[in-house]
Image (spheres, rainbow, N blue to C red):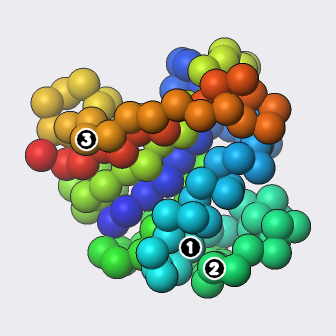
Amino acid sequence: MNLIVCLEDKNGMMFNKRRLSQDVAIREDIYKNMDGKSLIMNAYSFKMFEKDNPEVDIVVREDLPVCDKENLQFIEDKQLGKFESEINKMIVYYWNRRYPSDLKFDIDFEDGNWEVVSEEEFEGNSHEKITKKIILKK
């Protein structure tokens, strides 16, 4: 599986069943790097993406994550640790801020099983700095 997640500095994903933040610059970065693949997400996430009217194929499913080795899945409201063995690639956008959170990302990229192959920073619409890391399973 190839997954996309957004995290704050303490690996928070959600607070009180709501996303911690959103920034159109992240969605634009996702769109320009799709390479003809589909983007899979749930209906909650789609509400954020649909307002952009993107010219990418978006598939809405509630049973995420799904075993799909070709396409990308945007996940913002599920812990993924129990699926770690099936994940090949993670695209992680870091907000570079601390937000309160009650749902934490539960995969440890420092455990020796993962390698950061790319890291870049860019300015967001509502965030001075967003860090994007592409992380592959070793």
- Element type at mark 1: strand
Mark 1 or mark 3, earlier in chain = 1
Circle 1 Cα neighbour tier, 10 Å, few/some/many (<14 / 14–19 / ≥20): many
In the image, residue 46 above or below residue 87: below
Q: Quadrant of the N terminus?
A: bottom left
Residue contact at pointers 2 and 1, CB within 8 angstroms? no
Relative to 91, does residue 13 appear above or below in the rendering? above
**Rendering coords of residue 133 (x, y %):** 41, 38
Callout 1 touching callout 3 (CB < 8 Å)? no
Any part of residue 17 in sight? no
> Foreground mark, 2 or 1?
2
Q: Earlier in the sequence, mark 2 or mark 1?
A: 1
* Residue at numbered disc 1: 40
User: What amino acid is at disc 3?
Assistant: Val
Going by the numbered disc 1, the residue's amino acid type is: Ile
User: Which of the pair 67/132 is nearer the observer?
Assistant: 132
Picture coordinates of residue 46, whole percent (x, y): 75, 68
* Disc assigned to residue 103: none
Q: Secondary structure at mark 2?
A: loop
